[in-house]
Image (cartoon, rainbow, N blue to C red):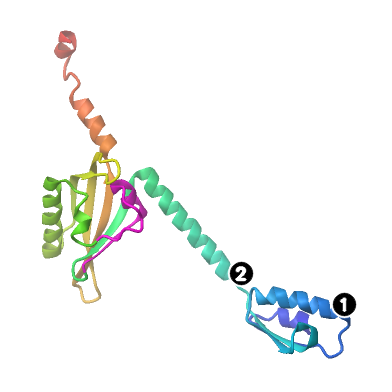
Amino acid sequence: SLRDALELQPALIFLHLASVSPEERLRVRMLADYLGGRWPFLILGTGIDNATHVLAVMHDITEEQRTQHALQESEFFLRQSQVVGEIGGWRANPFRNEVVWTEGIYHIVEMPTDYKPDLETALDCYLPESRERVVANLQEALTTGESFSIHVQVRGAQSGTIKWAELRGSPHYDAQGAIDYLMGTLQDISRYKAAEEELQSLPCDADEVDAA
């Protein structure tokens, strides 16, 4: 029966319509509309009004939908975490001239998310002195396999604002133990730097306080 067929996943549904009433045929039409939007579905005959059989395959996608929903929630949480923490992730493959940024880095450097940088253009956001240090540390990581963490300055493409950022990087190894790409994070630390400079400008001892 149809009820039994629906309990089997996946289920092959084959309905014989030779002797159904007009009311039942209307229900078949509704079923056809329902199946047509969800599963592969075939009417045998010259149309739904003159059909002799309905053939459809039904598969329960509840678990797939749950997995997709969980993935969407995880991606949303990652994006929100990057915005709040002012941090983004990056991956650079020097052998393919490929660079991948997460949304957080696009936000820091103020570039549209459809922008696709390569090894050369990914460095354009850094101020000249910082750019030289970034290149040197990337090359050293590729040569020695050592991770690095440096403070650099970047310029926002839209606002022109110069920002302090912490760039972290480390090598990734393939199955043969060779470095195949570098990966890491870039975090906006401008507020931390500003607070640090303000703290350093304060009087250091009681005599300086009195003199002020």
The amino acid sitting under disc 1 is Glu
Residue 61 lies in quadrant: bottom right
Residue 13 visible within the image: no
Q: Position of residue 55 (x, y in %)?
A: 70, 87
Q: Position of residue 71 (x, y in %)?
A: 48, 62
Q: Is residue 107 above or below residue 45?
A: above
Q: Residue furthest top?
A: 210
Residue underneath mark 2: 62
**Along the viewing direction, whichever of 111 and 165 lies nearer the viewer:** 111
Dot in front, 2 or 1: 1
Element marked by disc 1: helix
Q: Which residue lies at the image location 18% right of the left edge and 59% below the top edge?
A: 120
Q: CA distance from mark 2 to mark 1?
A: 31 Å
Q: Position of residue 84 (x, y in %)?
A: 39, 43
- Residue 114 belongs to the span the image colors magenta: yes
Q: Earlier in the sequence, mark 2 or mark 1?
A: 1
On screen, residue 71 versus residue 168, left or right, reads right
Residue 119 lies in quadrant: bottom left
**Along the viewing direction, whichever of 103 and 148 lies nearer the viewer:** 103
Q: Is residue 94 above or below residue 209?
A: below
Element marked by disc 2: helix
Residue underneath mark 1: 23
Name the quadrant of the N terminus. bottom right
- Residue 31 belongs to the span the image colors magenta: no
The amino acid sitting under disc 2 is Thr
Q: Which residue lies at the image location 27% right of the left edge and 44% below the top edge?
A: 156
Label 1 packing within 10 angstroms: few (<14), some (14-19), many (20+): few
Q: Which residues are magenta?
A: 97-117
